[in-house]
Image (spheres, rainbow, N blue to C red):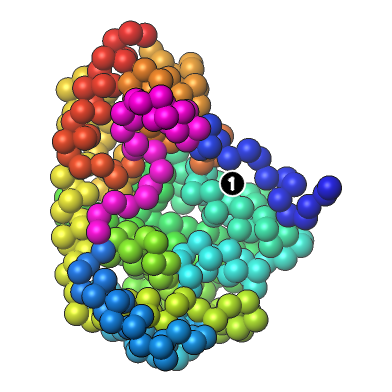
Amino acid sequence: MEFRRINALPPYVFTIIDGLKIAARRAGEDVIDLGFGNPDIPSADIAVEKLAEAARNPRNHRYSSSRGIPKLRLAVANLYLRRFGVDLDPETEVLSTIGAKEGLSHLMWVLLGAGDAALVPSPSYPIHIYAPLFAGAEVRRVSLMGGEEEFFANLMESFQNAWPRPRVIVLSFPHNPTTACVDLAWMQRIVEFAREHEVVLVHDFAYSETAFDGYVPPSILQVPGAKDVAVELYTLTKSFSMAGWRVGFLVGNPEIVQALAKLKSYLDYGTFQPIQIAATVVLNEAPEYPKEVNAIYQGRRDALCDGLARIGWELEKPRGTMFVWAPIPEPYREMGSIEFASFLVKEAKVAVSPGVGFGPEGDGHVRFALIENEQRIGQAVRNLRRALEKL
């Protein structure tokens, strides 16, 4: 049987490592999972308490609003004003989404169609590549491997050489998987370019609060005039450690926000209302919780990077995200990322994500997710040392 949209999807390479991990655990092995970026830090107590309270009220069991309840949209507008100095109209410039992936995917439906094109960083979080493809558009991958300055130059070249001219540029900083970061001046240049060439900027700001060593990730909406061309996806997944709650937002250009709102009015009734109520409370009453979460990630980052350095696996500490993007050590690089990641599961009992799963340019890397405590990360480093000595 032939299926639309999914026939061209390649095999999901992460399932290879996941299968090896599951098989090893069934055989009684203790596999330390640093692969799938599934946050293990609990959500704020106040969110859980408010969720339980709201769920006991039968009035909250009815359909909610696909736009998000008004108090939640106001809480997001207040967060942007407090955190970034950005004014947002909660009625026209804030929309609740069922997580960032849902928001991004359906956003592409209203921005792109057959005959259109989008520019996407490479390597990239998979949905950034496939959401435009699901909308029927072409995707032009732009290398990010040379750093943010080279990436900007590559974007300019790709835009000028592309036909049809790209309608959308997808961005995400701090970046998953490469952990690349940019400053506000970089954002200003890309906004100026987009305004000049009438191209829409879509910034996935998933790691807005996950940053270290004094780095403060900028919102693209901090750039004067950005609302003319840009929208941003903000989520509580990493910052407030609310991954399974599926609470995200599209903010920025009111025409684009309202276009997605119109589409979503046909597709869903929004996140379960007690979740929206709990999200409102946590935004208003626990605004400092991301700092607690961040401190945990920084401790894990240091434990992993310092541990890898001690065993001779040198890499630069990331300034953002909950990941470490590690070049495969030179003696083992010819294995490629899938074979190397498979070797680590079998011999080190450590699961990581093969870089090729984020695009061909990632094949010389693996990605560690900081989803185990520092003691487990220390054990992972010891396991890796023993395994790499065997090669």
Residue occupying the point 50% across, 61% down:
101
Residue 232 visible in image: no
Name the secondary structure under disc 1: strand
Residue 109 location, x and y as percent?
65, 69
Residue 189 location, x and y as percent?
42, 62
Who is closer to the viewer here, 18 or 240? 18
Position of 150 compared to 218: left or right?
right
- Judging by the rendered image, the residue that carries numbered circle 1 is 141
Residue 66 location, x and y as percent?
52, 82
Count of marks, rendered view: 1
Who is closer to the viewer here, 246 or 93? 246
Q: Where is 70 relative to 303, above or below?
A: below
Image: magenta residue range = 18-42
Q: Amino acid at mark 1?
A: Arg
Position of 178 compared to 217: left or right?
right
Residue occupying the point 34% across, 73% down:
222
Residue 309 location, x and y as percent?
20, 26
Q: Quadrant of the C terminus?
A: top left
Is residue 37 covered in magenta? yes
Residue occupying the point 38% across, 47% down:
37
Q: Where is 368 relative to 202, above or below?
A: above
Residue that lies at the very extreme toward the top in this rendered image: 390
Residue 26 visible in image: yes
Residue occupying the point 46% across, 47% down:
151
The quadrant in which residue 36 appears is top left
Label 1 Cα crowd, 10 Å radius (few <14 / some 14-19 / many 20+): some
Is residue 369 covered in magenta? no
